[in-house]
Image: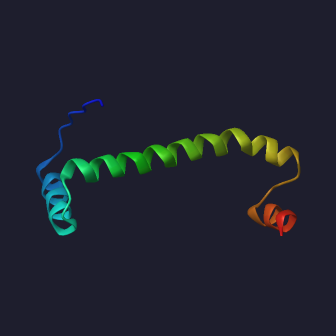
């Protein structure tokens, strides 16, 4: 397992501390969860960016086009 050290401002530290206490979790646990979610969002955006031209070439210009074909 790796280690990451970051500097955060006092307000963010206070907010994170309050959230951790309210959820009975550690700040590290919350930070890991938040980072995992952010990484997943960024991966999704990258995949979407790569797939969009292929989808448009196939005639999928909106979400409705896709839902129409899979419904």
Q: Is residue 21 above or below residue 12?
A: below
Position in image of residue 69 (x %, y %): 87, 63
Percent position of residue 29, x then y? 26, 50
Residue at x-position 27% and y-position 53%: 30
Q: 18 left or right of 47?
A: left
Between 27 and 12, which is closer to the camera in this rendering? 27
Work out which quarter of the rendered image holds the C terminus and state it. bottom right
Q: Where 47 sits versus 61, above or below? A: above
Q: Give the image location of residue 55, x and y in percent.
A: 80, 47
Q: Residue furthest front?
A: 1
User: Residue at image x 12%, y 57%?
Assistant: 14
Q: Which quarter of the picture shows residue 24?
A: bottom left
Image quadrant for the N terminus?
top left
| Near-viewer residue (31 or 42) | 31
- Residue 27 in the image: state x and y as whole percent: 19, 52
Figure check: 27 above or below 69: above
* Residue in front for this viewpoint, 55 or 4: 4
> From the viewer's perspective, is 49 left or right of 11?
right
Tell me how many marks there are: 0
- The residue at the point 11 percent across, 50 percent down is 10
Identify the residue at image location x=29%, y=29%.
2
């Amino acid at each position: 397992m790796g280690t990451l050290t970051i500097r955060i401002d006092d307000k963010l530290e206070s907010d994170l501390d309050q959230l951790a206490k309210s959820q009975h979790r550690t700040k590290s646990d919350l930070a890991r969860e938040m980072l995992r979610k952010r990484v997943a969002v960024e991966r999704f955006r990258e995949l979407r960016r790569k797939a969009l031209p292929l989808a448009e070439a196939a005639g999928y210009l909106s979400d409705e086009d896709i839902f129409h074909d899979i419904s």
